[in-house]
Amino acid sequence: MVTSSQYEHTVAGARLMMEAFAERRLPEWEHFARTTDLMTVERGTVLVPAHTHHPYVYLVTRGLLKLRFTQARVARTVSFHGEGEIAAAFNGLGVAAFGRVALRATPHLSADPRVWPEGNPFELVAIERTTVLRAGFGAIEELAERSHAWSRMLTTFLSTSMLLMCAGLPDSHLATPEERYRSFVSRRPDLVARISQRELAAHLGVTEVGMSRIVKRVGAQRAAAAAGTDTTAAP
């Protein structure tokens, strides 16, 4: 059960983070805070279902989420989100600004059903028991319309999220599964022990057997490197 003190502490932390994005105080904070809800969900809970307009973003305070999509009955994990990170299925947010300009400025893009909430293929799912602060994205957009500080916060949030997504594209499109796993171990050592090989296999697009082999091979090579020996030539 979430207590009022836990809620107040979490909202205060969210304010510090969001004001860091804006680099200034955010006016009308109480208006935004009224759209928030602190909730705890069990492993496997789908916070954001696919093909649904879901105008909420989630700040993870404890636990772990994944963003996934399913194609031809095969589930693939796009990203993981741990404590202190904000997660959302962006296609499902129904970003007002995109809707206003889509038909005029990006007709080729707006014809793709996946960019609209009803065609959004992504789901946000809890990997373990997780506590999140859910916040209304519509309130953020509304405040951004009339406040430079909120507009700056929203721009920074969206651009940072897109930057992180783009930073991972070379891994997902150019690297081998083993190279991507090595990159993941280097970038997110905090998550390696918390994510099962099944989850990693879905993230890297390999079978569980293949994932097990990769983990063993990389683990042996890292151990050998730490010991000052070389096993790269070993069968």
Image (cartoon, rainbow, N blue to C red):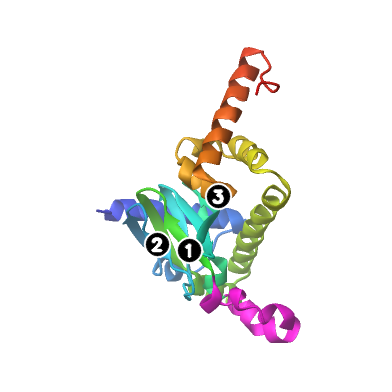
Q: Nearer the viewer, residue 153 or 127?
A: 127
Q: Is residue 103 magenta?
A: yes
According to the picture, the residue beneath numbered tag 1 turns out to be 123
Query: Nearer the viewer's eye, disc 3 or disc 1?
Result: 3
| Secondary structure at numbered mark 1 | strand
Q: Residue at the location (41% across, 63% down)?
A: 47
Q: Which mark is residue 174?
A: none
According to the picture, the residue beneath numbered tag 3 turns out to be 203
Residue 229 position within the rendered picture, expressed as x and y whole percent measured from the top left: 66, 13
Amino acid type, mark 1:
Glu
* Residue lying furthest left: 1
Query: Nearer the viewer's eye, disc 2 or disc 3?
Result: 3
Q: Are marks 3 and 1 in contact (CB under 8 Å)?
A: no
Give me the C-alpha separation between circle 3 and circle 1. Answer: 14 Å
Q: Are marks 2 and 3 in contact (CB under 8 Å)?
A: no
Residue 46 position within the rendered picture, expressed as x and y whole percent measured from the top left: 40, 62
Q: Quadrant of residue 95?
A: bottom right
Q: Are marks 2 and 1 in contact (CB under 8 Å)?
A: yes
Total number of numbered discs in the rendering: 3
Which callout, 2 or 1, points at the residue further toward the start of the chain? 2
Residue 167 in the image: above or below residue 217 = below
Amino acid type, mark 2:
Val
* Residue lying furthest top: 228
Look at the image and give the residue range highlighted in magenta: 95-120
Which callout, 2 or 3, points at the residue further toward the start of the chain? 2
Q: Is residue 24 magenta?
A: no
51 lies left or right of 103 = left
Q: Nearer the viewer, residue 34 or 67?
A: 67
According to the picture, the residue beneath numbered tag 2 turns out to be 46
Q: Quadrant of residue 113?
A: bottom right
Amino acid type, mark 3:
His
